[in-house]
Amino acid sequence: MNIMKKTILVALIAATPMMAQVKEKIEVPYISFPIKMGKGFDTVQANCLMCHSFGYILNQGRQSKKFWEGKVDKMIVHFKAPITDKDRKIIVDYLFKHYGNGKEQ
Amino acid sequence: MMERRDFFKKAAAVAGATALGTSTVDAGTTHQPISNRKVGDVAFPEKRPLITFSDRPPLLETPREVFTCALTPNDQFFVRWHMPDIPTYIDVDKYSFTIKGLVDNELKITLKDLKEDYEQVEVAAVLQCGGNSRSAFSPTPGGIQWGSGAMGCAMWKGVRLRDILDRAGLKKDAEWLAIQGQEKAAYYETPNFIRELHLDELDDHVIVAYQMNGEDLPYLNGFPVRLVIPGVYSDSWIKMIESITVTDKYQKLFFMDHAYVIPDNECECETPEKKFPKTKPIWKMNVKSIIGYPANGDKLTFKSQAVVRGVAFDGGAGIKEVQISLDGGKTWDKAILDSGKLGRYAYRTFRYSFKPNKLGKLEIMAKAINKLGEAQPLAKDIKWNHGGYKYNGIDVVTVEVV
C-alpha cells in the first residue's frame, strides 16, 4: 500500500484548459515499400492492401511455404479477409516465390 | 538491406551450430535481436523519423540511442496499431467514452469531465509491446520483427479507472471489463481490438490517461485517452478509448485468446514442431535492460574513460541492480542506478564507467536483476515460443576499441 502511494503522485489541479496540441486532421504519410513485381502481384495488392501495407510482408523475411500458407490462412480465418480459394493459392505462390526460403516446411 | 542479410547469415549460423545432427527446424533458437536498423526518411505526425515497419497501420520503432533517458520523448515513442482504419481527427469538445453494461448509471465521459470532475493522478510507467525484440527468435515467429525499441517510458496523467467505475456504480454480478478502442478494421467481420480485464486485476495504478510527459497524448499513441496498466504489456493498454463495458462473463476474444498468447507451462516455451496446446494471454512484464549507449559498431578510444548507459525495468517489483560484463559474462560489475524516484514501474537508468584497455572488438553485456532476485538470462538460454513474446535476454553490444 505504501509503495503504491509513492508511485501515484496526486496532483490537485482545479481546471485544465481545453487545448489540443493538434487541432486539425493528421495525415499519415504514404510509404512506398520496395515490394517485388511478378505473377500474382495484382491479386496480392487487391487482397492484402485492404488491411495492411507491404511493410508487413517484407518484415517477415524469407520464409517457408508452410509459413506463408499459415499467414494467409490467419488472415482468412481470424481476420475474416474475404480471400477466395483461388486467390489464396495465387497469393501463397507469389509470397513463396519472392519471399520464400526454398523450403516447403 | 545489408543488415537484414547479415541477420539471416547470423541466424542461420546460430541454428546450424545448435543442430548437431537433428533438423535445424526443430531447434527453436534465440540470439540477439536485430540492432542498428536505420530510422526512416519520413516523419509521421507528431513524431521524429523512427524505424518504420508499416504506414498502414503505423508501426514505428524507437532507435537504441533513446534508451539512455528515464522518460522517452513523446516524438520518439514507439507506435503500434493493429487495424488499418485509425481515426485521424478527434474533436476534443465532442469526444467522449462510455461506461456501460452492469452499472447503476451509464456514463458518458468527456475530456472536460475527466480533467475536472475526478481526482487527477500521475504514474510513470513503461509501455512495452509483448513482441518487443521478437527478431531474437529463430525460426521467425509470425509478427513484426521488432528490434529492442518497441518500448518506452512516460509519465502518464489521468484518472483512476477505479474512481470512474465507483461513480458508475458496479452491479453485484460485475466481474469483467471489456475495453474497446476506436481503431477499425477494413471488414465488419474482423474482430475488434478489445481487451478484457478482470476486476481483481484492477488496482489503483490502472488509469485512464489523457496526458503523456506533460503533453496531450500524441495521436499515434492513442489521443485523446488511453488505458495505462503499469507493469503489463502494451496490448492491454487500449488506445483512443471508445467504451468500457462491464460484464459478468468473459468474452472469448481474438487478440487475447489467440494473438497475444504464450504457452501455459512453466517455461512458457514450446518447439516450432510441437506447439504447447494450452495457452494464456501475456500479462506482467519480465525483467529486462537495454544498453542505450554505445551502439553496435561504435568506436571507443583506447584507455579513455568510456561510459555505458541504458535503462532497466520489470513488471513492478522494481530493479535491484544492473550488472555489466566486459569479458563475455565471466565477471560482472555493478552499474550505478539513478535514484528510482520515478517509481517501480518506470525505467531505472544505469551508467557504468570503465577504461577500455585492449584494442579491437569489445563485447559489453548488461544484466538487470529485480527485487525478487529474477535476473535476465543469456539470449541463448531463452526458450522459443510461437508468438515470439517476452524476450528478455541479456543485451550485448559489440564496439571497437581504437
Image (cartoon, coloured by chain):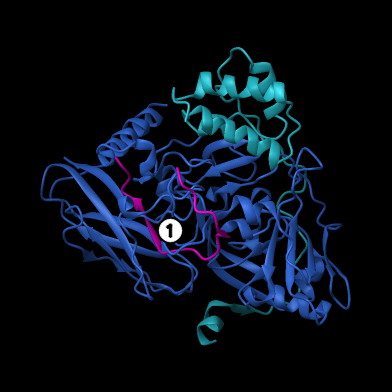
Numbered marks: total:
1
> Going by the picture, which residue comes out furthest to the bottom?
A2
Q: Is mark 1 on a helix, strand or loop?
A: loop
Residue B199 in which image quadrant: bottom right
The C terminus of chain B: image quadrant: top left
Q: Position of residue B74 (x, y in %)?
A: 57, 53
Q: Residues within 10 Å of mark 1 (few under 14, many from 20)?
A: some
In this orientation, which residue lies closer to the viewer: B369 or B345?
Answer: B369
- Residue annotated with mark 1: B69
Write down which chain is painted cyan: A
In this orientation, which residue lies closer to the viewer: B30 or B153?
Answer: B30
Question: Magenta span covers which residues?
Answer: B273-296
Compared across the picture, whether B353 is left or right of A98 comes to left
Q: Residue at x 11, y 50 (%)?
A: B357
Chain B as rendered: colour: blue
With respect to residue B34, does B97 lie above or below?
below
